[in-house]
């Protein structure tokens, strides 16, 4: 509430604001980003399946999520997980059936923690968000590699980016097996993948995608909190 009466209420309000700031800071994720023309090395810190040779319960596995994104160039973060399998109803699927050209089709995406090594030697743990659709390059190759080798956490991969926006192309190259990195050493730095996607109950999905316009004006609110990119050049939500 915007009104506080008495010093006790003022202090309680400040404490609550501090708690919210700390919670927001703790929930932030470091999304993997690249610039046009950049080439970086990444080491997958999680397997794709619990049956993998190097699976670690502490590290967990990558997550595949099918999401519906609200059509529109400025709405790439207004998205939620398809609920058809869980609730046998989904607003995004309904909109896609009404107009299959409108852009509501569900898109499957992989979220997984990686160790990033850039050309200047800097290293960081980040969340890689990559398409597992027809235009995807990294996830489909990673799946095939996991099926053939029974692990994805045993080597460096090189990713090269070229192009901007819809013309962006990501080219993955598989390195040789190595023991340079031990994923277990980074287990305490991994980001919670369950916070990377938004689950909205079917009953609330229409309001999520089309929130009531305040004061009779159109509103485009409802963007997905932390899941955003700094600019169109390095969008973490581009389908790779």
Image (cartoon, helix red, strand yellow):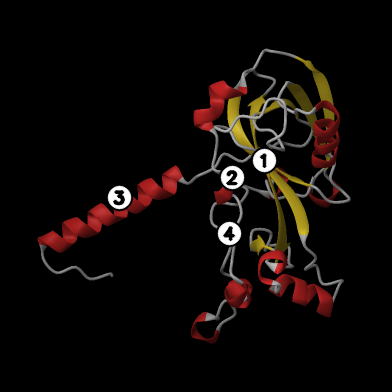
> Which residue position is annotated with label 4?
224
* Relative image position of residue 81 (x, y in whole percent): 66, 61
Q: Which residue is mark 2?
A: 193
Label 3 vs 4, first from the N-terminus: 3
Eyeballing the image, is 225 above or below 112? Answer: below
Q: Which mark is residue 18?
A: 3
Of labels 2 and 3, earlier in sequence is 3
How far apart are the alpha carbons under marks 2 and 3?
A: 25 Å
Answer yes or no: do the residues labelled 2 and 1 have beta carbons within 8 Å?
yes
Real-space CA distance between mark 3 and mark 4, rounded to the nearest whole angstrom: 22 Å
- How far separated are the C-alphas under marks 4 and 2? 14 Å
The answer to whether 211 is drawn above or below residue 112 in the figure is below
Instruction: State if disc 4 and disc 3 touch (CB < 8 Å).
Output: no
Considering depth in this image, is 29 or 161 the residue closer to the camera? 29
Using a 10 Å C-alpha cutoff, classify the residue at mark 2 as few (fewer than 14 neighbours), some (14 to 19) or many (20 or more).
Answer: some
- The residues bearing labels 2 and 1 have C-alpha atoms spaced at a distance of 8 Å
Please identify the quarter of the rendering in which residue 181 is found. top right
- Disc 2 and disc 3 in contact, CB within 8 angstroms: no
Residue 159, how many percent across, how many down? 78, 30
Q: Which residue is mark 1?
A: 62
Name the element at disc 4.
loop
Q: Is residue 76 left or right of residue 186?
A: right
Relative vertical location of residue 204 with respect to residue 182 in this rendering, above or below: below
**As displayed, is residue 154 above or below residue 172?**
above
Dots 4, 2 in contact, CB < 8 A: no
User: Closer to the N terminus: mark 4 or mark 1?
Assistant: 1
Report the residue at 12% width, 60% height from top.
Answer: 8
């Amino acid at each position: 509430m915007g009104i506080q009466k008495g010093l006790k209420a003022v202090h309680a309000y400040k404490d609550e604001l501090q708690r919210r700031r700390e919670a927001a800071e703790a929930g932030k994720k470091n999304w993997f980003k690249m610039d046009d023309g950049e080439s970086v090395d990444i080491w997958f810190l999680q397997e794709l399946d619990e049956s993998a040779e190097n699976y670690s319960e502490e590290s967990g596995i990558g997550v595949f999520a099918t999401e519906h994104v609200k059509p529109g160039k400025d709405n790439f973060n207004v998205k939620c997980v398809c609920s058809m399998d869980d609730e046998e109803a989904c607003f995004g699927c309904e909109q896609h059936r009404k107009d299959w050209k409108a852009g509501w089709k569900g898109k499957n995406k992989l979220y997984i923690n990686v160790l990033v090594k850039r050309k200047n030697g800097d290293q960081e743990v980040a969340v890689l968000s990559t398409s597992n659709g027809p235009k995807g390059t990294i996830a489909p190759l990673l799946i095939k590699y996991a099926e053939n080798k029974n692990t994805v956490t045993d080597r460096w991969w090189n990713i090269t980016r070229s192009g901007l926006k819809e013309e962006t192309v990501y080219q993955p190259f598989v390195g040789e097996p190595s023991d340079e990195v031990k994923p277990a050493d980074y287990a305490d730095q991994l980001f919670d993948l369950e916070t990377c996607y938004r689950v909205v109950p079917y009953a609330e999905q229409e309001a999520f995608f089309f929130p009531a316009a305040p004061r009779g004006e159109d509103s485009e609110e409802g963007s997905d909190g932390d899941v955003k990119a700094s600019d169109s050049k390095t969008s973490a939500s581009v389908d790779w």
